Image: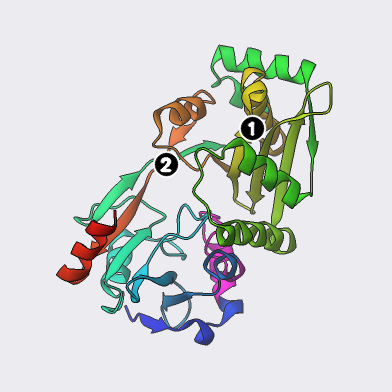
Amino acid sequence: MEIIYVKNREIDRERWDTTVASDPQGLPYAYSWYLDQATSGQWDALITPDYKYVMPLPWNRKIFGIQQIFAPLLTQQLGIAGPNLSEETTTIFLNSIPKKFKKIVFPLNQKINHPKCRTKTNLVISLTSSHEKIQEGYKRNLIRGIRTAAEKTSINESLLINDLLTFYQQTLKSQLHFSQKDWQRIHQILQAATQYLEPLMLEVRNEHGQRLALGIFIITDKRIVYLMGCANAEGRKKFSSSFILDTVIKRYAATNRIFDFEGSDIPGVYKFFKSFGSEEANFSVYEKNELPWLVRKGMERRR
């Protein structure tokens, strides 16, 4: 298999996005427009000459000016887009990453057995069945909570990206470590998604009109990705996030899509997502560190 390293400016965007769109997993992260926003345009690629397989290489120079490959914001999985992806093909691509990238933390879109890979948890639900059938997999207390939320709160769509991000930031401020540039990138990703795909932004409000929770999703032909979500204290008590997730599952039931929770390795979050009857669809993260010894020591001192 011939694999070529191409700089960003040399990539045929139309052929690239066609390959990503036809990928059987239906993930949104590898579209050229998504990568442009998530990396501020700093990504190159490995491709086969016919664009049958493509693999993005997002990079930066945050380690003493040395180029590294990293996982961008709001980008759970990348890996290789293309048909009938095998572990052998993935390994060939990983071995073709240019040596100039001395540190690599690269999320794949499949689980492989590789000495330099660790496994990350992901949970999904198949939306091939009706909503009623899918709900048979829900925990009983989850169903009760959703019914109560439907009676005592309201759910609405919103296009106010700045407003939603402000609520997200205020609600999770103790858990977030985003810079101002990070927030700008997040806004740009969501704004671009409204142009190229089908984003869905939902909010739950109480009887006084106060926002309790939000959920932001990106929908492709094959997958619904739960990109961002949060609930404040009142929202957690009133099952607001559960209400949002069930609303989306109900809307897209029997569409043959995959509902992707985007995680999680956090025990509490994992238990919550599992309460919907979800199944694991884990993936690997490829890691490599060939930084010079002095650079590693310098990084240790900075911690």
**Residue 31: percent from left, percent from top:** 57, 66
**Callout 2, which amino acid?**
Ala
User: Does the magenta run of residues contain 18?
Assistant: yes
What SS does tag 2 mark? Answer: loop
Residue 280 in the image: state x and y as whole percent.
Answer: 41, 36
**Is 82 colored magenta in this rendering?**
no
- Asked if residue 94 shows in the view, the reply is yes
Sequence-earlier tag: 1 or 2:
1
Per the rendered image, the range of residues in magenta is 16-33
Report x, y in % for residue 68. 34, 70
Residue located at (35% from left, 80% from top): 3
What is the spatial separation of the Cα atoms under label 1 and label 2, in whole angstroms?
18 Å
- Secondary structure beneath label 1: helix
Q: Residue at x 45, y 55 (%)?
A: 77
Q: Residue at x 58, y 78 (%)?
A: 13
Identify the amino acid type marked 1. Answer: Leu
Mark nearer the viewer, 1 or 2: 1
Q: Which mark is residue 237?
A: none
| Residue identifier under label 1 | 245
Q: Is residue 269 left or right of residue 12?
A: left
| Furthest residue in direction bottom, as rendered | 10
**Callout 2: few (<14), some (14-19), or many (20+) C-alpha neighbours within 10 Å?**
some
Residue at 30 percent of width and 78 percent of height: 98
Residue toward you, 164 or 28: 164
Name of the residue lying farthest toward the right: 208
Q: Nearer the viewer, residue 134 or 64?
A: 64
Report the quarter where the N terminus lies: bottom left
- Residue 128: in sight, yes or no? no
Please determine whether, in this image, residue 17 is positioned above or below residue 109.
Answer: below
Residue at the outermost left position: 293
The residue wearing badge 2 is: 281
Quarter of the rendering containing residue 179:
bottom right
